[in-house]
Image (cartoon, rainbow, N blue to C red):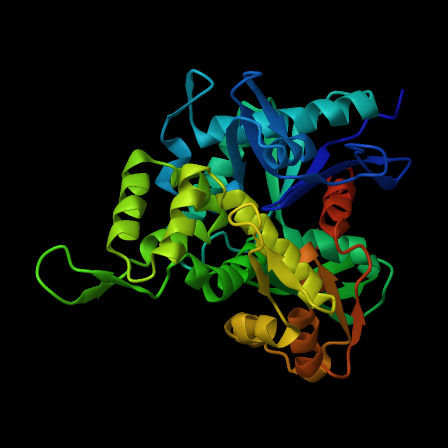
Amino acid sequence: MAQRALGLGVDFGTSNTAAGYVQDGRPRLISFAPGQTTIPTTFFFNFDARSLLIGEPANQALLEGAEGRFMRALKRILGTPLMHEPRRLLNERVTFVEIIARFLAQVKARAEAEAGVSFDRVLSGRPVVFHGAGDPREAAAEADLRACYLAAGFRDVEFMPEPQAAAIASGALEDQGGIGLIVDVGGGTSDFSLFRSGRDGVTILANHGVRIGGTDFDRAISIDRVMPHLGKGTELRKTLGTGSTPTPNAIFNDLATWEKIAFLYTPQNRRLAAEMVRLAHQPEKLARLAKVLEDELGHDLSFAVERGKIAANGGAEGASILLDRIEPGLVLPLSADALTESLARHADALAEGARETLRIAGLDVACVEKVVYVGGSSLMSLVSQTMQNLFPQAVHSFSEVFTAVANGLAFAAGDARPIRPV
């Protein structure tokens, strides 16, 4: 029997989730599979088995073409009306609060089975901003996430900004007097926290966040490099009279957006695509869009974009986006230069986010001695290049990119909170 922990720390992420607790004074992350301390934040409603799969089994069901509904990036709809709209899945009407709660309940059950204790209290990470500074949906987003945890069986729910948790895990508690910057680029948001280390713990000097993450990188690449091959930017013949009209952009924008894909497979959209094929000057392109909607291949397309992004970011020769499920032999090249071009506007926004954090704290770039990268999307070269250009004198650290937030939350959940807010 493990020693009793004070609480469970949970990093519920847009793309991946991790959880941990304190054992013998040190954070211990939950194992979701042998050697795996993170789990994809994905859902698959299997229509044949009439069951909900989460994580890797959900991803595998999608790849195997199982009959069902796949969902990802649900964290991005917190605070929106979609969270509370009932939807019929597996012959029951459920809301996204209930769907996320089922995911969190499985995380809770695995943690309790591993730790040998019951976790009634949870310390959850949260982005500095869910939607944007001053956005009226901010309070609603945290309230929605709290409702998800309560529905999952937790009785006491507290929150800590994710970069603050990362500051704890970065070793800041052992440093003395230095000023560091946490750059937390996850699936849905980018958060920045300036902190100072001292004998009494960590003092947060400023927090700031922008709604940019890995899913936005995917979206930009998809819109720029993929959607033109599905008909975006082409012309349609007018149904009456002569002349042409542009193909509507909305359906392409939604198809490139992870959290909106599951809502596109409607009879209305399929009829729209068929009509566009009929009127298209380039029907072969619109036919690809029609196939994606008819065969529900939107997530397959997005995963292909994500794989291409990772390959191009890693400098792989001949990196490409493989779309052979949509059309045999359809391969779209994605060079490092093309990647940089598609993501340039996001690099600028990240730089401005870091500069705004400095302005809030009243500090100059020269004051930052250490930049700590957190979140899987911080491994994108545009992130480190942008920050190294901004902070050329600082030490740049990539340790615990995927688990720093969860480690910090686990430590804080079982400790007296050795961190002071702004």
The location of residue 161, given as percent across then percent down, is 61, 51
Q: The N terminus appears in which quarter of the rendering? A: top right
In the image: residue 260, left or right of residue 161: left
Give the residue at x 80% y 64%. Answer: 198
Give the residue at x 51% y 27%. Answer: 68
Q: In which quarter of the image is residue 244?
A: bottom left
In the depicted structure, whether residue 258 falls above or below residue 32 = below
Q: In which quarter of the image is residue 134?
A: bottom left
Is residue 213 or residue 172 the one in the foreground? 213
Residue 226 appears in the rendering: yes
Furthest toward the left, the residue is 241
In the image: residue 268, left or right of residue 385: left
Is residue 284 or residue 214 the one in the foreground? 284
Q: Quadrant of residue 30?
A: top right
In the depicted structure, whether residue 362 falls above or below residue 83 = below
The location of residue 10, given as percent across then percent down, is 68, 38
Residue 356 appears in the rendering: no
In the depicted structure, whether residue 324 falls above or below residue 354 = above
Q: The C terminus appears in which quarter of the rendering? A: bottom right
Give the residue at x 47% y 18%. Answer: 90
Exactly how many numbered labels are in the figure?
A: 0
Give the residue at x 71% y 51%. Answer: 165
The location of residue 44, given as percent across then percent down, is 56, 30
In the image: residue 309, left or right of residue 243: right
In the depicted structure, whether residue 303 falls above or below residue 213 = above
The location of residue 289, given as percent across then percent down, is 40, 50
